[in-house]
Amino acid sequence: MKKLLFIALALVSVSTLSAQEKKNNTGFMNRSGDHLMLQLSSDHWIGAPDSIKSRIKGFARGANVYVMLDKRFKGSPQWSVAFGLGLGTSNIYFNNMTVDIKSRTNTLPFTNVDSVDHFKKYKLTTAFLEVPLELRYTFDPENEKKSIKAALGVKVGTLLSVHTKGKNLLDKNNSGVNNFIAKESAKGFFNSTRLAATARVGYGNFSIFGSYQINNILKDGVGADMKLFQVGLNFSGL
């Protein structure tokens, strides 16, 4: 977690420096350019079998932060290309199910724990260092903070960490056994690279975004062919 926080702080620092740009080649002054993007998402595993899908609990969620450089086309100022660097995270919560990411088996075990001791709260978290690329359109490039905006893009990421976290142990009758936190980390079952298609549409500094993973979450042969889909709110500026 300390490494992830350090990366996030570094990205914000870079964004502050990039925001000092006063004028670009098209002559627009002090435009925001959406150099910093913060995203909060609702997360879904597309393709998950019913045995897993039925155990995903509550509101699975993610958070992404990106620092972007925005390059406007000289002859068509409504259009621009943006690229950058960022951190993408996803948290999937399970009800009475564990995911043994440290298992030595050939496939990743998802275990039903209804009839044995289990955690009241249990989640699987992934974190990727990502490089996003967007083709952007701004309807009013001279007044970006009051303009409709849209973007299509892709992002490629490299896996930083995978961990599970269980909190508050219960028995099979859901009575408290012990209040403690158990955390395990391992990346062996998960694809080390993530490729996703992205889209955004909104007004000013606020937009709705979607991200669909093109390749699978897990490596071939170790589990179901599942892909991460994120949809949520995007806050941009600087």
Image (cartoon, grey):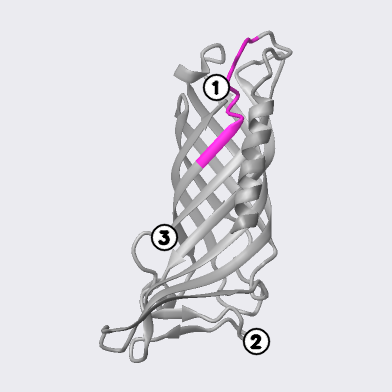
Disc number lying in front (2 or 1): 2
Q: Is residue 107 visible?
A: yes
The crowding category of the residue bearing disc 3, from other C-alpha atoms within 10 Å (few below 14, some 14 to 19, many at least 20), is some
Question: Which comes sooner in the sequence, label 3 or label 2?
Answer: 3
Indicate whether 57 appears above or below 66.
below
Whether tag 2 and tag 1 are in contact, CB under 8 A, the answer is no
Who is closer to the viewer here, 109 or 127?
127
Mark 2 = which residue? 106
Indicate whether 73 appears above or below 3.
above
Mark 1 = which residue? 138
Answer with left or right where residue 170 lies relative to residue 180. left
Residue 60 numbered mark, or none = 3
The magenta stretch spans which residues?
28-38
Q: Amino acid at mark 2?
A: Asn
Question: Mark 2 and mark 1: span between their CA atoms?
Answer: 49 Å
Whether tag 3 and tag 1 are in contact, CB under 8 A, the answer is no
Q: Quadrant of residue 100?
A: bottom right
Q: Is residue 31 magenta?
A: yes
Q: Residue at x 52, y 31 (%)?
A: 236
Disc number lying in front (3 or 1): 3
Residue 204 numbered mark, or none = none
